Image (spheres, rainbow, N blue to C red):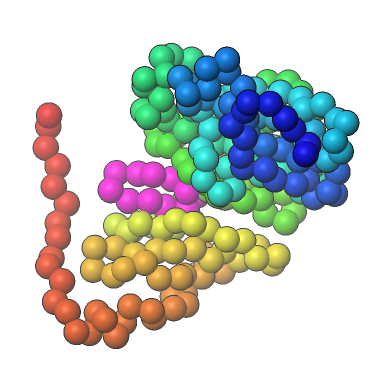
């Protein structure tokens, strides 16, 4: 084993050169009383010691930690590490870059008043990071440069788009659907959207779905 102790650990991910592993570990004295996790990096040898990069509320989904192509940065969807644990469910997860050699993280989506979710994907050239944005009754696929700046919306419309996967040529596959169309695989290439699967077409031809409309009110 590479680690030991009474810890809850998960989300391991290899660096591109295969020398290091990044992972999440809750090493609090009473781990059941906190939802925060430490972000650790270590060489993949039993004698290596894990280095703590920071402790945050971190998304536990697949792709929660992602190495940059050059191995210098770790991308993570993190919430604020401060505040009572009972409010952990209300964390606004933001895209953060952690320098692997240590230092404060760069928060890339601090101006976006919406939480983000993984998987977090680096383009092959390292120029963009792709993620999912949880918006008002919609999800959309977004991207931003590692240096910060404008967040680009790669999808649009009143639908839920999620679970992006990136090809070596930079094209993106993801799931997308709305109230009248269950999730199907879609393909985004050069800003052009293509529906790939028709898994639900036969079923949709034999049912009458009820129409839905957005509803908003002031609480």
Which of 44/14 is in front? Answer: 44
Magenta stretch: give its range: 132-146
Q: Give me the residue at 47% from left, 23% from top.
A: 32
Residue 168: image quadrant is: bottom right
In the image, taking residue 57 as reference, residue 129 lies left or right, namely: right
- 32, above or below 129, in the image: above
Was residue 186 drawn as part of the magenta stretch in this picture?
A: no
**Residue 109 visible in the displayed image:** no
Q: Give me the residue at 62% from left, 22% from top.
A: 27
x, y percent for residue 39: 65, 29
**Residue 117 visible in the displayed image:** yes
Q: Give me the residue at 14% from left, 76% from top.
A: 208
In the image, taking residue 64 as reference, residue 178 lies left or right, namely: left
Was residue 143 drawn as part of the magenta stretch in this picture?
A: yes
Tell me how many marks there are: 0
x, y percent for residue 134: 39, 44
Quarter of the C terminus within the rendering: top left
x, y percent for residue 184: 40, 70
Q: Give me the residue at 15% from left, 71% from top.
A: 209
* Magenta stretch secondary structure, dominant: strand
Residue 76: image quadrant is: top right
- 169, above or below 81, in the image: below
In the image, taking residue 156 as reference, residue 119 lies left or right, namely: right
Quarter of the N terminus within the rendering: top right
């Amino acid at each position: 084993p590479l680690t030991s102790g009474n810890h809850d650990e998960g989300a391991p991910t290899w660096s591109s050169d295969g020398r290091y592993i990044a992972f999440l570990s809750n090493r609090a004295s009473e781990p059941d009383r906190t939802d925060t996790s430490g972000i650790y990096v270590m060489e993949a040898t039993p004698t290596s010691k894990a280095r703590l990069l920071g402790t945050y509320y971190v998304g536990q989904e697949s792709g929660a930690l992602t190495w940059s192509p050059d191995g210098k940065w770790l991308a993570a969807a993190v919430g604020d590490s401060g505040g009572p644990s009972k409010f952990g469910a209300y964390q606004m997860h933001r895209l953060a870059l952690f320098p692997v050699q240590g230092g404060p993280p760069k928060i890339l989506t601090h101006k976006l008043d919406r939480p983000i979710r993984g998987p977090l994907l680096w383009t092959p050239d390292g120029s963009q990071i792709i993620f999912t944005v949880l918006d008002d009754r919609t999800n959309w696929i977004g991207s931003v440069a590692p240096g910060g700046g404008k967040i680009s919306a790669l999808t649009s419309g009143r639908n839920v788009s999620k679970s992006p996967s990136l090809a070596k040529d930079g094209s993106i596959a993801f799931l997308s659907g709305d109230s009248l169309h269950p999730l199907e695989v879609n393909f985004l290439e050069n800003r052009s959207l293509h529906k790939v699967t028709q898994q639900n077409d036969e079923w949709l031809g034999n049912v009458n779905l009820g129409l839905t409309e957005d509803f908003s009110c002031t609480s």
